[in-house]
Image: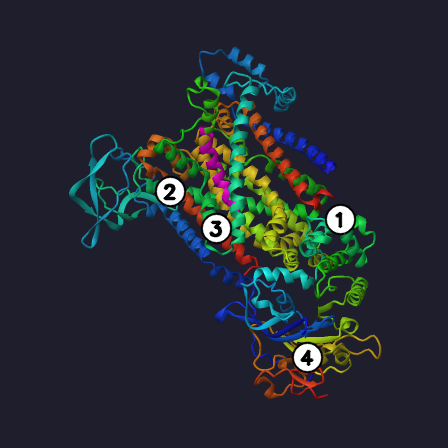
Amino acid sequence: MWSYVFKRLLHMIPLLLGVSLLTFLLMALSPGNYFTALSQNPQISPETIAQLKAQFHLDQPWYVQYVYWFKSVLHGDFGYSMAYKIPATSLIVQRLWNTFLLSFLALIIAWGIAVPLGIWAAVKKDSWVDRSCSLFAFVGLSVPDVLLSLLALWFAATTGWFPVGGAQSALHDFLSPGQQLWDRAHHLILPAIVLAASDLAGIMRRMRSCLLDTLRAEYVTAARARGLGEGWVVYKHALRNAINPLLTIFGYSLAALLSGAFIVENIMAWPGLGRLTMEAFFAKDSYLVVDCVVMATGLLVIGNFVADLLLAWSDPRIRLK
Amino acid sequence: MNETDPIQNPTVEQPLSPWQLFWRRLKQRRFAMVGGVILIVLYLVALFAGFVAPYNYDRLDTNYSFHPPLWPKPAGFHLAIPRYEPGAGSFVYRVVPNDTKPLHFFIRGDEYKLFGLVPATIHLFGTGDEHYPVYLLGTDQFGRDVLSRLLYGSQISLSIGIIGILLSFTFGMIIGGISGYFSGWTDTVIMRLCELIMSIPALYLIISLRATFPPSMSSAQVYAMIIIILSFIGWASMARVIRGMALSLREQQFVLAARSLGQSHLRIIVRHILPNTFSYVIVAATLSVPYYILGEVVLSFLGVGIQEPNASWGNMLTAAQNTEYLRNFPWLLAPGAAIFITVLAFNFLGDGLRDAADTKSL
Amino acid sequence: MNLLEIKNLKMDFGKNADALRAVDGVSLTIGTGETVCLVGESGCGKTVTALSIARLVPTPPANYVGGEILLNGRDVLKMSNGELRSIRGGVVSYVFQEPGASLNPVFRIGNQIKESLKLHRPEKATNDEVIRLLKLVGIPAPESRIKNYPFEMSGGMQQRVMIAMALASEPKLLVADEPTTALDVTIQAQILDLLGELKQRLGMAILLITHNLGIVGDMADRVAVMYAGQIVELSPAKELLRRPLHPYTRALMASVPKLHGTAERLSAIPGNVPRIGNFPPGCRFAPRCPIAKPECSDKIPELVEVEAGRWVRCPFWKTP
């Protein structure tokens, strides 16, 4: 099992390298850069601009820039954000944490609701429970993130129960620690629910179909034939096997979640990585964009890795081979 | 009776071909058929958007900015459109009593180009009078008819979905087929590339790709750019799956038989391997179109896709991001409903296709 | 009183107009310690009949429309869920065709066997008992095998484990549904030997389902031949093999390739087994029967005892 873990870890490194290279290349191909806008400004002399460009290595060919960038990243330094005028590292770390919070909470909500619902629907197949779950799943799958986010905003604005965007209120720093925690949570809930909602339907359907497939397996009939009670058969024998194929979609679920977070962050003003990416994009702050993309990819890759570990632990066929 | 005589079987069934069987199973699934019909209607309407829409997408009418949906009222055996005038407060309108104009069908109106080519002036419905506008879904902040913009936008959003899928799936099938069939170095390199592309969360990659294009381009260029970007994301996952299928199909005996008959690799891939993937591809394509449509919507929504004054479902929603607008003028969410219906229809159809192709289920 | 008495069992798939009759008036008895073989081609209803003994066929889509299944005198079809659970394993145990598929892939085999023990013989739910059972079915080095997962064993081993699990609850009747079909010929022989040996030692009754006539001679006391949902011949095994009476049985025997004598063209039964719902009127074998007469298609012949202990569903069984 440890060799498996090690191999996967080893695998992740060239992947992240490749991603950073690809993104860097894409940004390098981008016409103009941060200083293009600046150079329009008559108050800034061309010499200053040339100096700044040299400072950020933007006068070098892209592969040289990449080397500089890579070297500084290895030192944990993500460079300097030209748009924000602060070191990028602190900016990214904070936004990364926000995106992680949002995604993680959404993950828990989505799986926490979808898995029991899916089991219930499978066990009560063709009953009204099952049919309404299927319908709900269908509709849920079809509602785009964009629409859901906008509806959530509308809901928040009309009822006033939730804040409309942002991660904390303006008075946050003046609140007591307990109130601060509540403040953050209060801002986090609605975006997390919106994000979870889009993934929920898919997971529920998958859980239901996985369990139904497992219930058709011969070892389930054999277990019944041995006289085991129906509950025991379903929850111990069938479910244990049904979980495995479900774990394989964990990775996709995470990818969808991170992509979805991009939309939710931008619409509901949640200060995460996605929002930062757009801000950097508009500012043509190419290094920052690359940093964001690599970070987001890193989150995804690590998430996939965790999913693989879970799968290996759960399925002895993988663990022991 | 000799053992080798043909048997007189009292009940003989003519076996159905796989396609007939598939079609019959599909027809039994009502949701799928409903989805299919909805899609046909949507695409037909999009095709004839200029005709169905009462106005052009860029027709301004600032007297009626943010007008709520305006519906015809029955008047005898006809429908008539009442006239509205500004009321108290901004963007508030009230009906002028006893002042209506009948609603006509197939009426002459603003000029447009059907299919973008043929100039025409006949619209499906209208009053023919500027002072009695028909804004079935209300207007936006510039007084532009939401319904008309929705219809013109559907041309863009719906077509991008189909074209994007066609491009990326064709490409993905070919690459995947080659990769799986030949294995070895080609396979490893291609799969690594696919993995790379698939490791980046979709929207981050989309934005990065968008950055390589100039910020402002002509609308035709933007259209092509969106298709290129979305196809770039999409081909990788299709290639992965097709490669897996090709890998196992390659071991089948009919491939060996084809090789022994001297058929070339290309012929085998195209004639033998790929057709066996069709049932998967059709289902996957139908279920993936929504993602392409949504890709365009997000890009346009964030301001980096289809630009004003062109209408797309995405950029129409940008106005709805303003919560004040959203609260007071909820009809601005109409594009969201249109997207929802489209995605729902595709999901119904795709689900039905998948069930119909799965011969092991009922 | 017989251990098992199936009386005129009728079972459909589906309801009302769409109902397809899978089991049409099957009657069968098995006495204590007796081995009965149920023979027939795929789709004749033998598996479903066997699964019905412990009511293992899910209802829906199946439903029982007639007959009874008396296990130790009590009708299985009328039992409550609690009673059913106690007879499953306790009175009748199953061994299925695909050995790997009947074992849960994510649990160790030792634990799976112990599970059965805990349910039926809790005082014996120990590793020692598991080892004893594994030894009984001929698995070498059982102490280390306890910790294995199913995928770590060969097909033959898996089938032995399946048998061990079935025996753990000390059933009176073992139903084996084509237990050797999925195995190599040499392993087949081993498993059959094992079953025979267990039968001797434990005095267990066995219902052995197979489409392979070759097995019948070695194992069976009596044989029932099924065709299209009905039993067409019921007879002591030796008699059947020496002198089959029903045209279908005769055709089956004739189609077994012989290794001695002159090489002849393989005889096959012309035509196809009729599918459920497409049964011909009258005798279901008539369309393929070499001695069929026009009146055969009029009505379904009765199963009649024509000699001592020998039942045939064909009025023309005497025709050579």
Q: Is residue B213 left or right of residue B254?
A: left
**Residue A190 in magenta?**
yes
Q: Which residues are magenta?
A: A186-204
Q: Type of residue at label 4?
A: Glu
Q: Main secondary structure of the magenta part?
A: helix
Q: Type of residue at label 1?
A: Asn
Residue C148, numbered circle: 1
Q: For numbered disc 1, what is the local secondary structure? A: loop
Q: For numbered disc 4, what is the local secondary structure? A: strand
**Residue C292 in magenta?**
no
Work out whether disc 2 and disc 3 sit on a shared chain. no
Closer to the eye: label 1 or 3: 1
On the image, the x and y values in percent for residue C238 come to: 78, 78
**Mark 2 → mark 3, Cα distance in angstroms:** 33 Å
Q: For numbered disc 3, what is the local secondary structure? A: helix
On the image, the x and y values in percent for residue B290 come to: 48, 44
Q: Chain of mark 4?
A: C
**Mark 1 → mark 2, Cα distance in angstroms:** 65 Å
Q: Chain of mark 1?
A: C
On the image, the x and y values in percent for residue A101 come to: 53, 30
Q: Which residue is mark 4?
A: C233
Q: Is residue C293 visible?
A: yes
Residue B152, numbered circle: 2
| Label 1 neighbour load within 10 Å: few <14, some 14-19, many 20+ | some
Closer to the eye: label 4 or 3: 4
Q: Type of residue at label 2?
A: Tyr
**Mark 1 → mark 4, Cα distance in angstroms:** 44 Å
